[in-house]
Image (cartoon, grey):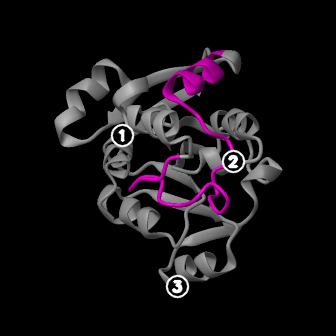
Amino acid sequence: MNRLDLNRVLDWVPQGSSVLDLGCGDGAFLQRLCSERGVTGVGVEIDADNLICAVQKGLDVIQEDINDGLQCFPAQRFDLVILTHALQELTHPHIALRRMVQIGKEAIVSFPNFGHWFCRMHLGFKGRMPMSRVMPRNWYDTPNIHFCTVRDFEALCSELDIDIIERATVAGPAQSWLGKLWPNLFATSAVYRICQSGQ
């Protein structure tokens, strides 16, 4: 598990906190959170095969569709709600974000930045949807349905009265400082700590 956004997420998770990992997949990152941060973790996953893998790892995982609003969780149930590289796959990402900051005292979200210069150039020069290491699938078989940039995400947080506590960017080694200065253009991914406004 070498994804740089996950390393940043891990850095932001306090030792011993309670965590809800949305779209936890096979549970590999949730397992890492438990072993390295000592969290009390619960995962949410819709795919039955992934769910079985996560449960076989000894993890607590619930089968539920994030798009249904996560109604089974009361407000302030967790210290942290985490959603990594899945926001763009949700039918109603704005509803999910609103629920995340209600269920958790804070939330951490990471997503691929579709405003990255490579995406812009690929579309501009080739006239086709970009494919890369971060986005390796064709437009017709990708799970991504809501393409989002760093600026889009920050504007949405403002509309939803969600405060941004901290932002980190992921960029190639030669562009890491550019990713910090101009994230919308040079960050391949972005990671945000957020909470409900006034919380």
Which residue corresponds to mark 1? Answer: 12
The extreme left residue here reads 174
> What amino acid is labelled 2 in the image?
Ile
Location of the C terminus by quadrant is top right
Front: mark 1 or 2: 2
Q: Which amino acid does label 3 sit on?
A: Gln
Q: Where is residue 184 in the image (x, y as percent from the top left)?
A: 43, 25
Q: Residue at 63%, 51% (x, y): give it.
A: 144
Q: What element carries label 1?
A: helix
Q: Where is residue 158 in the image (x, y as percent from the top left)?
A: 63, 16
The answer to whether residue 26 is magenta is no
Tell me residue 96's x, y (percent). Answer: 71, 41
What number is the disc on residue 199?
none
What residue is at 18 percent from the left and 41 percent from the top? 173
Q: In this view, does 134 lie above or below 199?
A: below
For marks 3 and 1 on the same chain, the one whose residue lies earlier in the sequence: 1
| Gap in angstroms between the C-alphas marked 3 and 1 | 27 Å
Q: Residue 145 carries which label?
A: 2
| SS label for mark 2 | loop
Query: Which residue is more in the foreground, 16 or 125?
Result: 125
Residue holding disc 3: 56
Q: Does the magenta stretch include residue 141?
A: yes
The earlier-in-sequence mark between 3 and 2 is 3
Identify the image quadrant of the N terminus: bottom left
Residue lying at 23% horizontally and 33% vertically, measured from the top left = 176
| Foreground pick, 84 / 38 | 84
Identify the main secondary structure in magenta: loop
| Magenta range | 130-158
